[in-house]
Image (cartoon, rainbow, N blue to C red):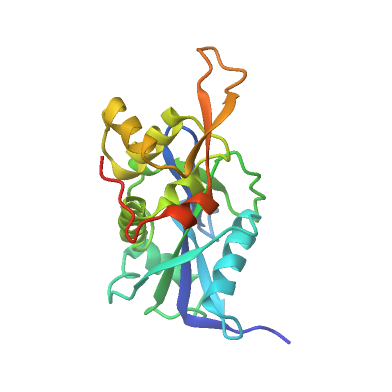
Amino acid sequence: MTRKLMNNLSVDCVVFGFDGEQLNVLLVERTLISPETQEVIFSDLTLTGYHIYEDEDLDSAAARIVKDLTGLENIVLEQFYSFGALDRLLHPNDQAWLEQFGDVFSNRVVTVGYYSLLPSTNVKIILKGRNVSWYKVSEVKGLAYDHDHVLQKALEHLRYKFWHEPIGFELLPMKFTLSQMQKLYEAVLGTQFDKRNFRKKVSQMNYVVALNERQTGVAHKPAQLFMFSRDVYEKTRKERFDFFV
């Protein structure tokens, strides 16, 4: 039996990854080619997203969409916002893109936003007919549809969570240095921290556990490695988490 897509409900997934220096987002290339001349009419970028099937829930749709476009699976996806502005699909490029599908999709589409956090951009991406690549969040602009707005909302949500939950450790490797941790927080929060104050704050977090290990294979003096202990955090956390330095 052929599964039927819902023509007015979609899911957009903002997949964030940290490369040790910058916060990145996974974007998909969208290229419209003239069927008559085979010339490129336009080419731009979108977030990973698509419409959902009538027989699936939103969480399942988000996981399917990310897997279909990138090959990534078993990653955590969290819903953060819904988008339903009347003009979100009215840009000429978006209208031209939709025209090639006839009446399959509605001109009025509500999308539900999800975000995911990956501790590295060195993940194997299996291309499924579309070019998918990592881009620095700080340099992204001019996305298709209303995806600039979707990305900004995801960032706002992520920044709020960074201040109030230890979610940042999802973007770090299992073993990390304090310099890596500081670079991550600076990249996500769009600010710079004094090194001494930052480390003083971290020293008060007994769930950031110092390991009897140091970096290997680096040109500079190897730094000490740390890890995040979820068990310690759950046992000792206060009623409210904050990361104000």
For the image, the number of numbered tags is 0
Indicate left or right for 51 with 240 as reference. Answer: right
Q: Quadrant of the N terminus?
A: bottom right
Give residue 78's position: percent from left, percent from top: 47, 65
Q: Is residue 140 visible?
A: yes
Give residue 124's position: percent from left, percent from top: 66, 44
Residue situated in front as seen by the camera: 131 or 195: 195
Q: Residue furthest right?
A: 1
Indicate left or right for 148 with 173 as reference. Answer: left
Q: Is residue 115 above or below residue 44?
A: below
Q: Is residue 192 above or below residue 39?
A: above
Q: Residue furthest front?
A: 236
| Residue 61, picture quadrant | bottom right
Residue under the image location 31 percent in, 26 percent down:
195
Indicate left or right for 217 with 171 as reference. Answer: right
Q: Is residue 45 visible?
A: no
Indicate left or right for 228 with 216 as reference. Answer: left
Give residue 242's position: percent from left, percent from top: 30, 51
Residue under the image location 52 percent in, 34 percent down:
226
Residue situated in front as seen by the camera: 2 or 12: 12
Residue situated in front as seen by the camera: 30 or 151: 151
Q: Is residue 173 above or below residue 110?
A: above
Q: Quadrant of the C terminus?
A: top left
Residue under the image location 58 percent in, 61 percent down:
66
Residue under the image location 40 percent in, 55 percent down:
237
Give residue 147's position: percent from left, percent from top: 37, 59
Residue situated in front as seen by the camera: 178 or 104: 178
Q: Is residue 174 above or below residue 46?
A: above
| Residue 80, picture quadrant | bottom left
